[in-house]
Image (tube, grey):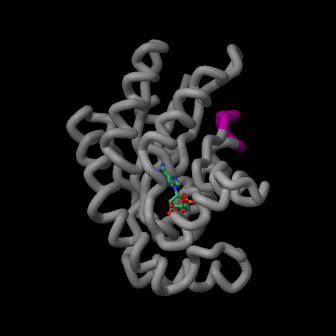
Amino acid sequence: MLNIIICGAPGSGKGTQSQLIVDKYGLQHFSTGDLLRNEIATGSDFGKQIDAIISKGNLVPDDIMLHLIDKYIDNLPADCKGVIFDGYPRTVKQAEELERLLEKKGEKSVMIDLWVQEEELIARLLNRGKTSGRSDDNLETIKKRLEVFHTTTKPVCVYYHTLHKYHAVDGSGTVEEIFARIDAILKSCC
Ligand code: ADP
């Protein structure tokens, strides 16, 4: 199996590039942001609690996320070619749990970290906010999300670096140019 962890700040293009990787390599797409937004869309009490967290730009607590990942890995189909983890892990605790679960299955993983300048990230997210309908695509929440990314999620990149599984990718340019950079890494290391 090919397990790819796609990391990057909000607006770095994780979702777009994940879809291209899924199309080319036939992987399962595990997007925690989509999963959480689907839960919000059901209107459940749990969804309302999640919405209150996400719309402020904070992270959903680890215990909830660890439960989601455990369930997801447990239910992977036997013929799964691999998974692209988009938006997970976002804390070192989540990363340790993911690595533990993959190791238990005898699975390997690799991290792709998309690098984009902060001004470009903010411009992309504000532009997306015009049509996305996402409660977190406004300037105040974007700034909070970027702060959370630097303080809590960047250490996840360091963690993968120490495991020698880390690859930084320039996330600027056209969608095709960025995908070509990712694809070259996947071809050389997987
Ligand atoms: P982005 O990368 O643009 O911020 P996502 O769709 O990946 O967008 O995530 C949206 C929000 O969902 C995050 O700001 C956070 O509140 C919540 N979220 C997503 N993944 C996780 C996770 N692994 N741990 C905690 N919260 C998460």
Where does the N terminus fall, quadrant-wise? top right
Q: 82 or 103, which lies in front?
A: 103
Say which quarter of the image contains residue 143.
bottom left
> Could you say where residue 133 lies in the image, as x and y percent from the top left?
71, 76
Image height of 70 relative to 24, above or below: above
Q: 103 or 141, which lies in front?
A: 141
Say which quarter of the image contains residue 77.
top right
Residue extent of the magenta highlight: 23-28
* Residue at 70 percent of width and 58 percent of height: 40
Residue 105 lies in the magenta stretch: no
> Could you say where residue 37 lies in the image, as x and y percent from the top left?
67, 58
Say which quarter of the image contains residue 134.
bottom right
* Residue at 38 percent of width and 78 percent of height: 118
Most extreme residue toward the front is 45
Image height of 51 relative to 85, above or below: below
Relative side of 134 to 145, left or right: right
> Could you say where residue 161 lies in the image, as x and y percent from the top left?
25, 42
* Residue at 57 percent of width and 84 percent of height: 126
Image height of 118 relative to 105, above or below: below
Image height of 175 relative to 6, above or below: below
Relative side of 68 to 102, left or right: right
* Residue at 44 percent of width and 40 percent of height: 63
> Could you say where residue 105 lies in the image, as x and y percent from the top left?
48, 14
Q: Disc count in the image?
A: 0
Q: 79 or 143, which lies in front?
A: 143
Most extreme residue toward the left is 162
